[in-house]
Amino acid sequence: MKPVVLVVEDEVPLLTLLRYNLEKDGFQVAEARDGEEALVAVKDHKPDVVLLDWMLPLVSGIEVCRQLRRMPETRGIPIVMLTARGEEADKIRGLNSGADDYVTKPFSPSELSARLKAVLRRARPSTSQETLRFADLAMDLAGHRVARNGRHVHLGPTEFRLLRFFLEHPHRVFSREQLLDAVWGRDVYVEPRTVDVHIRRLRKAINGEEEMDLIRTVRSAGYALDQAVN
């Protein structure tokens, strides 16, 4: 599954260039063109990483970064600042506001992509391993197998992708729309209720008798991989 990067940039030509290069390098790209739009987009869609321009209309990139770090539901999202301000004091200010990395303009698209992937690896170290684990559940990525308590779990392709996404983002609550974007893709139209069908299939497959339900339903919000009992 492609990681989703939210690009926050008010210069349309640069935004177009970033989208082209990042999509070519394996990212899904979402856009915001000012600080207020960025804050709404992060809350609504929970990207995997944010590429954030410093100089933005309405709310500055620095303030966006500070606000995202203050909120529990967004504080773990990696943020890379992108700016023309290359002085050491500016870099320190950006990093102190909560940014994970800092890229100055002009920049190399390949280097920018590499830095985004690096902060993603640091934020989700398990995704660079061959096995993803949560509680007594394990997914072997190389062998395309899933087991719980040593018991083989048979999953269809969609349930496998859905579980992998949950394993890469444990404890985080995702709406149906976010799961559709991440698992089915943004360019595919699927009814949101389809997510409920696949969640039921996933639950039936991974939860054996007397085993805790690892999929938590959050009313009016969505689903999470969690050990809390519904």
Image (cartoon, helix red, strand yellow):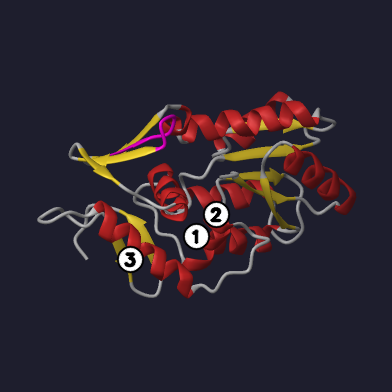
Position of 189 with respect to 53 (left or right) is: left
The residue at which mark 3 appears reads as: 200
Q: Amino acid at mark 1?
A: Leu
Q: Residue 86: tell me if it is visible.
A: no
94, 135: nearer the viewer: 135
For marks 3 and 1, the one nearer the N-term is: 1
Q: Is residue 217 positioned above or below 70 on the image?
A: below
- Range covered by the magenta-colored residues: 138-144
CA–CA distance in space, label 2 to label 3: 18 Å
**Percent x, y of residue 19:** 78, 47
Q: Amino acid at mark 3?
A: Arg
Q: Nearer the viewer, mark 2 or mark 3?
A: 3
Q: Quadrant of residue 54?
A: top right
**Percent x, y of residue 192:** 51, 72
Q: Is residue 107 positioned above or below 158 on the image?
A: above
Secondary structure found at label 2: helix
86, 163: nearer the viewer: 163
Q: Quadrant of residue 184?
A: bottom right
Circles 1 and 2: CB atoms closer than 8 Å: yes
Q: Nearer the viewer, mark 3 or mark 1?
A: 3
The residue at which mark 2 appears reads as: 182
Secondary structure found at label 1: helix
The residue at which mark 1 appears reads as: 179
Q: Residue at x 31, y 66 (%)?
A: 217
Q: Name the quadrant of the C terminus.
A: bottom left
Q: Amino acid at mark 2?
A: Ala
**Percent x, y of residue 89:** 68, 28
